[in-house]
Image: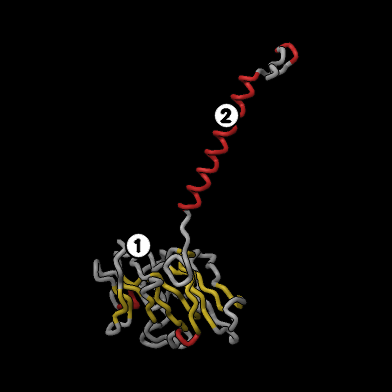
Amino acid sequence: MANVAVDAGNNGITRREFLYYIWGASIALVAAQSAGLMVWFLIPKFREGEFGGTFTLPISDIPEVNTPPAGYSEGRFWLSNLDTDQPNELMTPADQDTLPIKGIAAIYKVCTHLGCIYTWVGANNRFECPCHGSKYRLDGRRIESPAPRSLDRFKLAALADDKVTVLAESAISEDSGVYMPLELPSEAAFIQIDTGSKKLGDSLKLLCSYAGSCP
C-alpha cells in the first residue's frame, strides 16, 4: 500500500491523523443518531380519543345552556354550556363579572389545590372537591378556597361536518391568559377538545358572594 503521509512542511496530514478524524466523525454520527432516537421515544404520542390527544364530539353531545355539565372520563374534562345573559340557579353573573360569559368551556377534571378529582354536585349547583372543600361555579370559576385558582381549561375548535374544516377556535383572554368559552358558529357540526393544550385557570378574587359564604 502506498504511503499517504505528507510532509508536515507542506501542511498535510499523516495516515494516523486521517484515521483519527474518521474515527471521531463516526463516533459523532453514532452519538447524534442515538440522541435522535432517544428524543423520538421520549416525545409523547397520543391518538385521538385518549387523554393528551383530541376528542371530536357531535354538537348534539353538548349540554343545553346553563344546565349541568357533561363529563368525559376518557378525556378528563367537563363540557359546560354557558350564558350569563340567560341567568338561572346554575349560572348567574356575579358582581366581579364585568363581561358576559357565553359559549362552551372544556374544564379539566382535576382540582387546582392538590390534584384531587372533584365532582358536580347537583344539589348545590356547583363543582365541589371532596378532599379539601374547594368549590367552583359551572364555568370553573373558584367560589371557595383552598383552591389557589379557578379550574384549568382545554382548547376547543368548532368543526364543519367534514370534521376537518375549523370554523372557530378558543380565544385566549388578554387579562388572565385562560381559554375563553367558545361561541359555536351556526354551521358547526362537531366540537373538538384538545386535551394536549391546557391553560391554567385564573387567580381572580373568590366569588364568595355567589355561594353566600363571604366573611
Residue 30 locus on image (x, y percent): 54, 38
The residue nearer to you, when weighing 149 against 158, is: 158
Which residue is the site of mark 2? 23
The residue nearer to you, when weighing 72 against 42, is: 42
Pointer 2 or 1: first along the chain: 2
Residue 196 locus on image (x, y percent): 47, 64
Q: Residue furthest front?
A: 1
Q: Kindly state the secondary structure of the residue where label 1 is placed.
A: loop
Q: Is residue 112 left or right of residue 158?
A: left
Q: Residue at x 41, y 64 (%)?
A: 203
From where the camera sits, is residue 212 visible?
yes
Q: Quadrant of residue 66?
A: bottom left
Quarter of the image with the C terminus in it: bottom left
Other residues around mark 1 within 10 Å, as few (<14) / some (14–19) / many (≥20): some
Which numbered disc, 2 or 1, marks the residue closer to the eye? Answer: 2
Q: Is residue 102 left or right of residue 207?
A: right
Q: Residue at x 46, y 88 (%)?
A: 86
The residue nearer to you, when weighing 154 against 149, is: 154
Residue 6's disc is none
Q: Kindly state the secondary structure of the residue where label 2 is placed.
A: helix
Residue 76 locus on image (x, y percent): 38, 71
Q: Is residue 142 left or right of residue 181?
A: left
Q: Residue at x 39, y 88 (%)?
A: 88
Q: Amino acid at mark 2?
A: Trp
Quarter of the image with the N terminus in it: top right
Which residue is the site of mark 1? 148
Q: Residue at x 54, y 65 (%)?
A: 174
